[in-house]
Image (cartoon, rainbow, N blue to C red):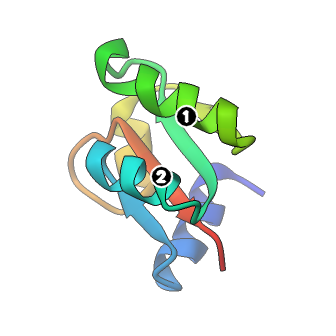
Amino acid sequence: MSLTMSLEEALKAGKVKIGTKQTMRIVELGQAAEVYVAKDADARITTKVIQLCRRSAIPVTYVDTMKQLGKACGIEVGAAMAVLMIE
């Protein structure tokens, strides 16, 4: 299953949140199933979320670019990260 397909399906179900603040909130609440992080996003933005995911055993999937992640999430701009929520 491709990144785009899995995110598109989850988006339709309302199970994806896009952006750093929303991702951090969902991870902190223990509602994250998986986090997607763009490799070209600023490390100052992504490091804290990645460390929290590691401590919480939440899988992190890296996407090549912010533009690619944004497109997979159905938005016209790049995204540093997105979170797939627990169903």
Tell me where residue 10 sits by quadrant.
bottom right
- State the residue in front, 74 or 29: 29
Q: Which residue is mark 1?
A: 52
Task: Work out which residue is located at the far bottom of the displayed protein and give it.
Answer: 13
Q: Is residue 78 left or right of residue 31?
A: left
Cα separation between marks 1 and 2: 8 Å
Residue type at numbered disc 2: Glu
Residue 50, position in %: x, y? 54, 29
Q: Given the image, on which type of amino acid does mark 1 rest?
A: Leu
Mark 1 crowd level (few <14, some 14–19, many ≥20, 10 Å Cα): some
Q: Quadrant of the C terminus?
A: bottom right
Secondary element type, mark 2: helix
The residue positioned 57% from the left and 56% from the top of the image is: 4
Q: Are marks 1 and 2 in contact (CB under 8 Å)?
A: yes
Q: Position of residue 36 (x, y in %)?
A: 54, 42
Q: Secondary structure at mark 1?
A: helix
Residue at coordinates 48% horizontally, 52% vertically from top-left? 28
Question: Between 37 and 52, which is closer to the camera in this rendering?
Answer: 52
User: Which x, y percent locates residue 72?
Assistant: 46, 54
The quarter of the rendered structure image containing the N terminus is bottom right
Report whether 16 appears left or right of 76. Answer: right
Q: Earlier in the sequence, mark 1 or mark 2?
A: 2
Q: Which residue is mark 2?
A: 28
Q: Residue furthest left?
A: 77
Q: Determine the image quadrant of residue 33.
A: bottom right
Q: Position of residue 64 (x, y in %)?
A: 52, 25
The residue closer to the viewer here, 51 or 65, is 51
Quarter-of-image position of residue 54: top right
The front one of 72 and 29 is 29
